[in-house]
Amino acid sequence: MLSGLVIVDKPQGWTSHDVVGRMRRIAGTRKVGHAGTLDPMATGVLVLGINKATRLLTYIVGTSKTYTATVRLGESTITDDAEGDVVATMSAAAVTDEDIRAGVAALTGEIQQVPSSVSAIKVNGERAYARVRSGEEVKLAARPVTIHRFEVQDIRRERGGDVVDLDVTVECSSGTYIRALARDLGSSLGVGGHLTALRRTHVGPYTLDQARTLEELAEDLEVFEMSQAARALMPNRELSPEETTEISFGRRIAAGAPAGSAYAATAERPAAAFAPDGSLVALLADSGNFAKPVLVFAPGTGPGAGSGQAD
């Protein structure tokens, strides 16, 4: 059974669910998932898991992301991006380059961000965007995010300076909304702003250079098999033959590092454990003097073997 990660260069206009559906047909399996939604307007890196590799997706979702984007100052939209109607305009002619860079600096680091009201966040069991479309006013709570890098690559003044377009690069924590960043930059400068283009270039260790279009994947399905994907994603631990046998049956082995140390594996950040032949056996978490399987991938007849469970 084919299992592994597929790095897709998502086309504009497609939802992440659309891409998953197409990959199910390409790979010939229903068991396909993605590691973090991209808006239909956005393009770029979308990581998909096929069959057993869907178990790795939860560890990819929380990784940092990098984007290239274009922010337009001087116009606000209902969706904070180019897909929504313009609801306010104000000339950005008086906004200087220094003002822009100061505004960007203020939105770098650990910040509190209010997601876009048309996000997929659920409010009382219903998606926020559905409530907005039905005419309801939705106000979401601010949440902490980290903007590791927010750099302005180019500043272009259009329409006599009334509109300013910024090409930016953003590296951020999981859960960051780039369109909310555009909105907040425009708001801080007093002229409003929204996102006009967005391309994701990195998801954790996976890059745009590794991504393939759906057309290319339909011709030649390029899959990062389980061991290859796990080696790039998380800390590695090489097992002895004896340890491989124990872990294959869901049993614990000696810890790779003391619990609580910087090198200790945890359930949230496990270590990928490999057999002497290089195959992925399990994901391990250190606890005291022992390492315990979080997920077991190796075939066997013991508890959790091949099922993604451990005792």
Image (spheres, grey):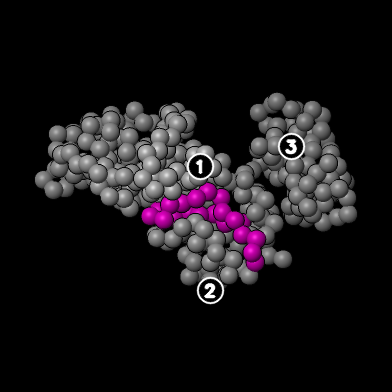
| Residue at image coords 46%, 51% | 38
Part of the protein shown in magenta = 29-49
Q: Is residue 223 above or below residue 149?
A: below
- Residue mark closest to the camera, 1 vs 2: 1
Q: Which residue is mark 3?
A: 285
Q: CA distance from mark 3 to mark 1?
A: 32 Å
Query: Residue 6 location, x and y as percent?
Result: 57, 59
| Residue at image coords 34%, 28% | 106
Numbered disc 2: secondary structure: helix
Relative depth, front residue between 119 and 105: 119
Residue at far left of view: 160
Q: Residues within 10 Å of mark 3 (few under 14, many from 20)?
A: many
Relative depth, front residue between 120 and 167: 120
Q: Is residue 263 left or right of residue 161?
A: right
Q: Is residue 48 magenta?
A: yes
Numbered disc 1: secondary structure: strand
- Residue type at tag 3: Ala
Snapshot quadrant of residue 72: top left
Q: Is residue 239 above or below residue 277?
A: above
Q: Is residue 223 left or right of residue 13?
A: right
- Residue mark closest to the camera, 3 vs 1: 1
Relative depth, front residue between 62 and 180: 180
Query: Residue 70 location, x and y as percent?
Result: 31, 47
Residue 219 image label: 2
Nearer the N terminus, badge 2 or badge 3? 2
The answer to whether residue 155 shows anywhere in this view is no
Query: Residue 27 location, x and y as percent?
Result: 61, 68
- Residue type at tag 1: Lys
Q: Which residue is mark 1?
A: 122
Q: Is residue 89 magenta?
A: no
